[in-house]
Amino acid sequence: MILSIESSCDDSSIAVTKIDSKEVLFHKKISQELEHSVYGGVVPELAARLHAKALPDILEQTKEFFPYLKAVAVTNEPGLSVTLVEGVAMAKALSSSLNIPIIPINHLKGHICSLFIQKDEEFPLGVLLVSGGHTQILHVKNYFDIKLIASTLDDSFGESFDKVAKMMGLGYPGGAKIERLAKKGDENRFNFTVPLKNHQNIAFSYSGLKNQVRLCIEEIGELKDQDMCDIAASFQKVAVEHIVWMLKRLFKKEKFDKFAVVGGASANMYLREKLEKITPNILTAPLEFCSDNAVMIGRAAINEYKAKNFCSLNNVKINPKISF
Ligand code: KG4
Ligand code: ZN
């Protein structure tokens, strides 16, 4: 079995996965959303302190598995440095006391593996990764061979939902809240412009759209409930249209046998619906594994374990910024 730890942002999570059958034997996640909500975003220092409390509380419940552990996997990149440190410190302590190797895991590879929880992998694959920190299109030949095709030039898809929610005083995280309001809104009331339509490359940008929403909110002044629903719907429509526009361009150049969407924001049903229209049978992760969790880290770790990609106690590097 592998015990996996995730603490790259605001979710403290630990899982235990069987290496051969991929069966998930234990999973617990303590989310910090409530604590960060008042600030409209994640406060790294607060997040680190909350991990320091939550991770040992969860670990306590996994003791029965200790005799069977072959490795401890931990997210070491990318993420907030002060929160990554919390998970890595726990992994080091377990490695030392149980005499098992550490498997450092790239969080983005974890998101890709969220497609294959308790299942075999299906590669090659085109992947749209939409989270709070990333908006990328990836060509995944296999777990160890991943090429970045396109990325955001500024804000990420999920982050733009968080920022629009913050502007409307909805708290953090904003994704699910915006999606809920959008269901009751008129998506054609505000004509926000789809970003980068004439850009020469396939890329994403959300900072301009965010500013369009800001100006719209300022112009209205005091927002009524219906205004908020209409803004949410009009914003979500254009945020998703931007992705669809870029993917259509990509699909003209490159053919994928299979395509998938992963990351916290892939829980957005409106996005899934629109993607399904341009790439039918798109692969998605179960909703509970779209946002950050240790199960996807454990699933990724099975690949690393089989390749014997182990790290000794003194060699675990934390890379807050690294991507593909
Ligand atoms: O993958 P994740 O849990 O954390 C990162 O790795 O960043 O993604 C969290 C992000 C947040 O920005 C959150 O607002 C967004 O995913 N999100 C959504 C939805 N649910 C979560 N964005 C749009 N619509 C949703 N339903
Ligand atoms: Zn994530």
Image (cartoon, rainbow, N blue to C red):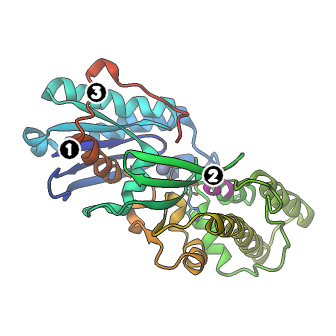
Which label sits in the foreground, 2 or 3? 2
Is the distance from the Cβ of mark 2 to the nearest ligand 1 atom less than 8 Å? no
Determine whether the residue tagged by mark 1 lies in a helix, strand or loop.
strand
Location of residue 311 by image quarter: top left
Mark nearer the N terminus (2 vs 3) = 2
The x, y position of residue 170, in whole percent, is 66, 60
Q: Are marks 3 and 1 in contact (CB under 8 Å)?
A: no
Left or right: 50, with 238 as reference point: left
Which amino acid lies under the numbered mark 1 shown in the image of this protein?
Ile
Left or right: 237, with 312 as reference point: right
Mark 1 and mark 2: Cα distance apart in space: 33 Å
Residue range corresponding to the magenta coloring: 154-160
Indicate which disc residue 311 carries: 3
Q: Residues within 10 Å of mark 2 (few under 14, many from 20)?
A: some
Mark nearer the N terminus (1 vs 2) = 1
Indicate which disc residue 150 carries: 2
Which amino acid lies under the numbered mark 2 shown in the image of this protein?
Ala
> Which residue appears at 71% of the width and 68% of the height?
245
